[in-house]
């Protein structure tokens, strides 16, 4: 997921992890360290588009690197106001704290759900090897996040996402995707719906 090199000494989900995950077992990791996350609560309220009933994305897919490191979107970036609104909506999601990502480039904003016991986390819901990061928003507006398995292929077919190349590795779930940077208000609504769905999947881990 990183757009740039991961800082020295940190483990990236785009770099080969230093442990092996037993077949069929949920991985166990130590909690990440780093800057204290922010709990800023903006005044924006996301509207109600449903992830199971989305329109197709207009136009061709943007060019991407197609590589594990970095897996970057190269064109069709978000206007600054759209990215700011996306960040504001992400911060409204229950339990979410934001801060520097430990599995991406330093400028990306991590979306975390701390406090979920490791044994209760769904393997498909997080950006391994992070223990609690289910997504992050890059500076140009595209996201890396996990999506629910039942909507993954639909999102690909509609042109909104592509699977992260790291999902070719057996130790990473198939549900890690790049959601292309929203370019306008309509695409922001789609991004919000997918983000809410990703968040809901991660919360299931706490049940």
Image: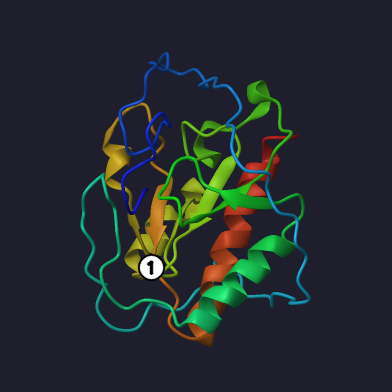
Splitting the image into 4 quarters, where does residue 30 fall? top right
Nearer to me, 8 or 187: 8
Query: In the rendered view, does 174 fall on the left or right side of 80?
Result: left
Quarter of the picture containing the C terminus is top right
Q: Residue at x 70, y 38 (%)?
A: 114
Splitting the image into 4 quarters, where does residue 153 fall? bottom left
Residue 157 visible at all: yes
Q: How many marks?
A: 1
Residue 103 x %, y %:
44, 41
The correct choice, above or below, for 138 with respect to 183 in the image is above
Q: Residue at x 45, y 78 (%)?
A: 55
Residue 84 x %, y %:
58, 75
The colour scheme is: rainbow
Query: In the rendered view, does 105 fall on the left or right side of 116?
Result: left
Residue 159 x %, y %:
34, 70
Q: Residue at x 57, y 77 (%)?
A: 189
- The residue where tag 1 is placed is 180
Q: Residue at x 64, y 63 (%)?
A: 90
Query: In the rendered view, does 168 fall on the left or right side of 153?
Result: left
The correct choice, above or below, for 9 with respect to 107 in the image is above
Nearer to me, 6 or 176: 6
Residue 51 visible at all: no
The correct choice, above or below, for 84 with respect to 157 in the image is below
Residue 74 x %, y %:
25, 68
């Amino acid at each position: 997921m990183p757009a740039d090199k991961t800082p020295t000494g940190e483990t990236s989900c785009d770099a080969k992890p230093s442990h092996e995950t037993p077949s069929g077992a949920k991985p166990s990791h130590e909690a990440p360290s780093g800057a204290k996350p922010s709990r800023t609560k903006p005044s924006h309220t996301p509207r109600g588009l449903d992830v199971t009933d989305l329109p197709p994305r207009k136009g061709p897919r943007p060019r991407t690197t197609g590589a594990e490191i970095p897996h970057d979107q190269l064109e069709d970036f978000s206007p600054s106001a759209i990215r700011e609104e996306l960040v504001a909506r992400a911060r409204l999601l229950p339990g979410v704290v934001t801060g520097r990502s430990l599995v991406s480039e330093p400028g990306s904003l991590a979306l975390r759900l701390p406090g979920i016991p490791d044994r209760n986390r769904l393997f498909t819901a997080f950006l391994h090897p992070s223990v609690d990061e289910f997504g992050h928003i890059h500076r140009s507006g595209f996201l890396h996040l996990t999506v629910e398995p039942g909507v993954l292929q639909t999102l690909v077919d509609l042109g909104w996402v592509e699977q992260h190349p790291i999902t070719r590795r057996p130790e990473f779930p198939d549900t890690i995707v790049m959601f292309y940077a929203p370019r306008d208000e309509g695409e922001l609504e789609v991004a919000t719906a997918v983000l809410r769905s990703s968040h809901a999947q991660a919360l299931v881990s706490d049940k």
